[in-house]
C-alpha cells in the first residue's frame, strides 16, 4: 500500500511541491523505478560497477521518499539499501540530467518512555498508549516467557524505556526496548532486554529459559544434543574489519556499506566452507575479485571474496570445513585478506552473530509413543550492556510520573529543496 505525507515546502520561488513517502514494491528493480519516472537508464553509465551491485540490495517494504514538482516530475529520491545507507537520485538544477550517489541516511536516535496500564493485554494497551504498532510488538515479545500475561489484571502497570530512530518525524526501523518494569499486587519485577528483543529477569550469569514443542512419548530420558552451527571460514581467524551498514572505505575514501567481516591472513591460507551446501557461484565479481558463494540450508548463503585461487566449481556439493579456495588480494583490495559475507533469506547479516568455533551442546527431555506438549529447560549466558544505567533511567521516569511519548501519525514541517545538502538536512527536522 502506498501512502503520502504532505509537507509545507520552502523554495527559491513559490510553487507547489510535495514529498511522497512510499513503500518499495516486491519485484521492482531500480531500472523499473527509472522507467516509472521517464528517466533514462543512461544515468547508470556514470555509476561504478561496485555501486551498481548495491542496487540489488533494495528490498520490498523499504520506505523511500520522493520530492516531486507540481507537474509530477521527480526532483529527488532517497531510497534505502540498508539501515544506514541510501541511494540519492536527483535532477541537476536547470537541466534535465539526473545524478546518482550513495549517501548515509540521516536520522535521529532518541530514548523514549512508555507507561502502560493494563485494561485488556500488553500489546493492545501499549499500542493505545504510544500509537506505535512496532513498540507494542517489541513490548509483547520482551514479556514472552518471563511473565504470564494472562494473569495480569486491570490496573496493573508495565513501564519501559526504548530507543527509536526517527526520520522526518516518523519512526524509522524497529525500536529497541532496553529495560521494563512490571508492577502488580504480587509482582514488582525489572526485565532486561537484549538486542534481539528477548527479556530476562537477570543478567551477567547463566540463566534458564524454556522451549515448548511436540514430543513423542512412551518413556522419557534426558539426552545430549549437538546443535548445528556455522564453523569459521579459516583457521586462526583475525578480524581486521567488522560488519557495518556504514563504513569509511579505505580505497574509495567515502562511506559505503561493509556487508561482511574481513579476516587478515597470509596469501595462500586455505579457506573453509562454513557449513554443508552447494556452490552457487565461483568466478570473478568486480571489486570482490575471485569469489565463491555457497548456498546452505535454512535460507543462508556464504560469500568468500578476494581469493588468489579457487578449488570449487558452480554446482559442486561441499562439506563443512572443506577447502574451497585460498586467501589472496584479487579485485579492489589493500592486501591479502578474506572478505566473508553471509546472507539470510536474501539479506546481508552480521556473520559474527552466526559463526561459532564450536557447536553448542544442550540437554533435552525426549519422550516417545505419542505426541504431547513438552516444556524443556535450557541454559545460556546472558550479558546485556548498560542494564544498571537503564534501570536508573526508568526509575527516574517513574518517579517524575512522566507521560508516555505518543507518536504522531503524520509529519508537518518545512523542507528546503533547492539543493542536495538542504534536502538531506531536512531529514533532521
Image (cartoon, helix red, strand yellow):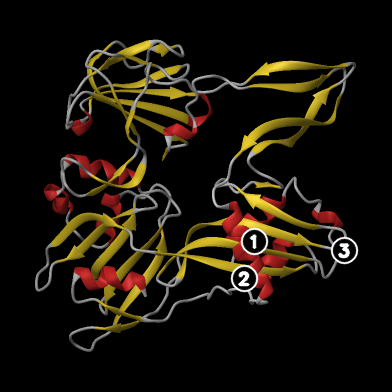
Alpha carbon separation for disc pair 3 and 1: 23 Å
Residue 219's x, y, as percent?
89, 16
Residue plotted at (67% across, 58% down):
180
Residue plotted at (57% across, 61% down):
162
Residue 279's x, y, as percent?
37, 18
Residue 268's x, y, as percent?
24, 13
Q: What crowding class fits label 3: few (fewer than 14 Cα within 10 Å), some (14-19), or many (20 or more)?
A: few
When the figure is inspected, residue 313 is found, relative to residue 194, above or below; the finding is above
The residue carrying mark 2 is 130
Q: Nearest the camera: 397 or 257?
A: 397
Q: Which of marks 3 and 1 is nearer the N terminus?
A: 1
Q: What crowding class fits label 1: few (fewer than 14 Cα within 10 Å), some (14-19), or many (20 or more)?
A: many
Q: Nearest the camera: 140 or 410?
A: 140
- 392 vs 211, left or right, is left
Residue 151's x, y, as percent?
86, 56
Residue plotted at (87% across, 22% down):
370
* Residue 72 visible here: no
Quadrant (top left/top right/bottom left/bottom right) for the C terminus: bottom left
Label 1 sits on a secondary structure element that is helix
The residue carrying mark 3 is 185
Q: In which quarter of the image is residue 290?
A: top left
- 311 vs 405, left or right, is left
When the figure is inspected, residue 125 is found, relative to residue 366, above or below; the finding is below
- 129 vs 44, left or right, is right
Q: Which of marks 3 and 2 is nearer the N terminus?
A: 2
Q: Earlier in the sequence, mark 2 or mark 1?
A: 2
Question: Disc 3 or disc 1, which is closer to the eye?
Answer: 3
Label 3 sits on a secondary structure element that is loop
Alpha carbon separation for disc pair 2 and 1: 8 Å
Mark 2 and 1 residues: CB-CB less than 8 Å, in contact?
yes
Which disc number belongs to residue 136? 1
Q: In which quarter of the image is residue 48?
A: top left
Amino acid at each position: 500500500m502506498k501512502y503520502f505525507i504532505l509537507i509545507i515546502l520552502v523554495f527559491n520561488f513559490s510553487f507547489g511541491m510535495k514529498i511522497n513517502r512510499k513503500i518499495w514494491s516486491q519485484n521492482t528493480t531500480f531500472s523499473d523505478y527509472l522507467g516509472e519516472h521517464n528517466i533514462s537508464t543512461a544515468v547508470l553509465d556514470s555509476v561504478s560497477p561496485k555501486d551498481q551491485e548495491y542496487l540489488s540490495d533494495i528490498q520490498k517494504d523499504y520506505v523511500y521518499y520522493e520530492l516531486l514538482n507540481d507537474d509530477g516530475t521527480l526532483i529527488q529520491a532517497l531510497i534505502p539499501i540498508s539501515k544506514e545507507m541510501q541511494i540519492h537520485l536527483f535532477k541537476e538544477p536547470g537541466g534535465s540530467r539526473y545524478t546518482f550517489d550513495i549517501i548515509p541516511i540521516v536520522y535521529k536516535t532518541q530514548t523514549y518512555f512508555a507507561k502502560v496500564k493494563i485494561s485488556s493485554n500488553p500489546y493492545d494497551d501499549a499500542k493505545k498508549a504510544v500509537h506505535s504498532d512496532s513498540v507494542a510488538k517489541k513490548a509483547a515479545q520482551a514479556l514472552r516467557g518471563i511473565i504470564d500475561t494472562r494473569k495480569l489484571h486491570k490496573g496493573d502497570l508495565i513501564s519501559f524505556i526504548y530507543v527509536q530512530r526517527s526520520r522526518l518525524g516518523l519512526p524509522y526501523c524497529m525500536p529497541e526496548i532496553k529495560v521494563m518494569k512490571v508492577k502488580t499486587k504480587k509482582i514488582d519485577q525489572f526485565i532486561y532486554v537484549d538486542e534481539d528483543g528477548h527479556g530476562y529477569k537477570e543478567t551477567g550469569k547463566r540463566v534458564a529459559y524454556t522451549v515448548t514443542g511436540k514430543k513423542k512419548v512412551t518413556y522419557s530420558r534426558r539426552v545430549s544434543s549437538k546443535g548445528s552451527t556455522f564453523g569459521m571460514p579459516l583457521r586462526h581467524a583475525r578480524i581486521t574489519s567488522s560488519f557495518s551498514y556504514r563504513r569509511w572505505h579505505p580505497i574509495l575514501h567515502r562511506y559505503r556499506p561493509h556487508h561482511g567481516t574481513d579476516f587478515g591472513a597470509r596469501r595462500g591460507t586455505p579457506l573453509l566452507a562454513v557449513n554443508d551446501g552447494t556452490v552457487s557461484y565461483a568466478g570473478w565479481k568486480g571489486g570482490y575479485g575471485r569469489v565463491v558463494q555457497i548456498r546452505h540450508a535454512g535460507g543462508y548463503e556464504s560469500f568468500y571474496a578476494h581469493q588468489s585461487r579457487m578449488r570449487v566449481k558452480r554446482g559442486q556439493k561441499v562439506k563443512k570445513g572443506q577447502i574451497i579456495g585460498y586467501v589472496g588480494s584479487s579485485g579492489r583490495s589493500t592486501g591479502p585478506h578474506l572478505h566473508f559475507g553471509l546472507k539470510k533469506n536474501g539479506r546481508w547479516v552480521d556473520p559474527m552473530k552466526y559463526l561459532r568455533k564450536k557447536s553448542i551442546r544442550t540437554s533435552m527431555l525426549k519422550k516417545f509413543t505419542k505426541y504431547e506438549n513438552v516444556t524443556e529447560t535450557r541454559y545460556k549466558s546472558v550479558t546485556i550492556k548498560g542494564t544498571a544505567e537503564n534501570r536508573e533511567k526508568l526509575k527516574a521516569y517513574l518517579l517524575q510520573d512522566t507521560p508516555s511519548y505518543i507518536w504522531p501519525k503524520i509529519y508537518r514541517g518545512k523542507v528546503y529543496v533547492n539543493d542536495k545538502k538542504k534536502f538531506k538536512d531536512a531529514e533532521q527536522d
